[in-house]
Image: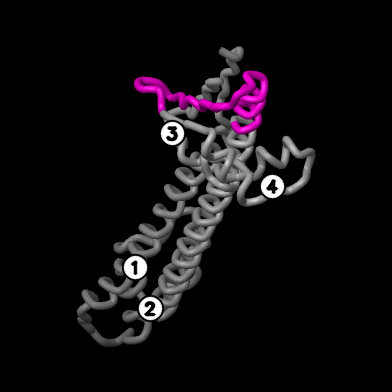
Amino acid sequence: HPHRSGMRGDNYFEEVLSSATLSSALKTLYLGLPAKDDEIISLRNQLKVSPIRGTDFIEITVKDPSQEQAALLANVVAEAFIIRRTEIERQRADQALEALNDEIKLQADLVEAHKLEFVNICKTYHLDQPFQKAELPTAPEFESTMHARIQRENPKQSVCYDLSFPLHNFQQAKNDYLQSRDMLRDMMIKHQEARLLFKIPRNPVTIHERAK
């Protein structure tokens, strides 16, 4: 008795012959009782599983003296295979989602670290609370603040300071923060799309045929 199962592009026909799938099939036949190892081996010897060329289907063929028994075995094996594949896909999706969440958390921690570094740089050069406004301070604003501070500290002197080093530190810290923040945003968008894909059911489609 042939039975065909559609896999939506994935060739999992080897999974049909796995002990987990066959044990589940026999448990269904035995009304919940566990199958013995020799019974699993015997059922595996009755089965032939092969991909159907040019399609997303596999063919499960059962050899048995009884046509009705062959049809029954083909059906219960196919159903057990569907359940097994669904469980595996769900486990993989859960693991993938957990990995995505871990990546998001790591990137969020990096953003906070760069943000703190930028705030400290600004405080060092007396540019307080850089996140109060909608936009972060610019390099010209930083230079202007530095020049104003220098003038306040040296009101009666004409002092010329090289601001290239503090300006470099300011710009580097700002760029690190912005790049990590933008990367986090991109990751969250991509990960949200991935979450939606992982939640789409990927259950195999089966086609039952009459016994031949």
Q: Quadrant of the N terminus?
A: top right
Measured along the vertical axis of the image, is residue 94 above or below residue 180? above
Measured along the vertical axis of the image, is residue 48 above or below residue 44? above
* Camera-side mark, 2 or 3: 3
Q: Which mark is residue 35?
A: 4
Its colouring scheme is one colour
- Please report contact status of discs 2 and 1: CB closer than 8 Å, yes or no: yes
* Spatial CA span between label 4 and label 2: 75 Å
* Mark nearer the N terminus (2 vs 3): 3
Residue 25 magenta-drawn?
no
* Mark nearer the N terminus (4 vs 2): 4
Q: What range of the chain is rendered magenta? A: 51-77
Q: Quadrant of the C terminus?
A: top right
Crowding at dot 1, Cα within 10 Å, few <14 / some 14-19 / many 20+, comes out as many
* Mark nearer the N terminus (2 vs 1): 2
* Mark nearer the N terminus (4 vs 1): 4
* Residue assigned mark 2: 125
Residue at left offset 66%, top offset 25%: 69
Residue at left offset 46%, top offset 61%: 107
Task: Give the structural element (helix, strand or loop) at label 3.
Answer: loop
Nearest the camera: 74 or 141? Answer: 74
* Residue assigned mark 3: 10
User: Which image quadrant is residue 179 in?
Assistant: bottom left
* Residue assigned mark 1: 142
* Spatial CA span between label 3 and label 4: 28 Å
* Mark nearer the N terminus (1 vs 3): 3
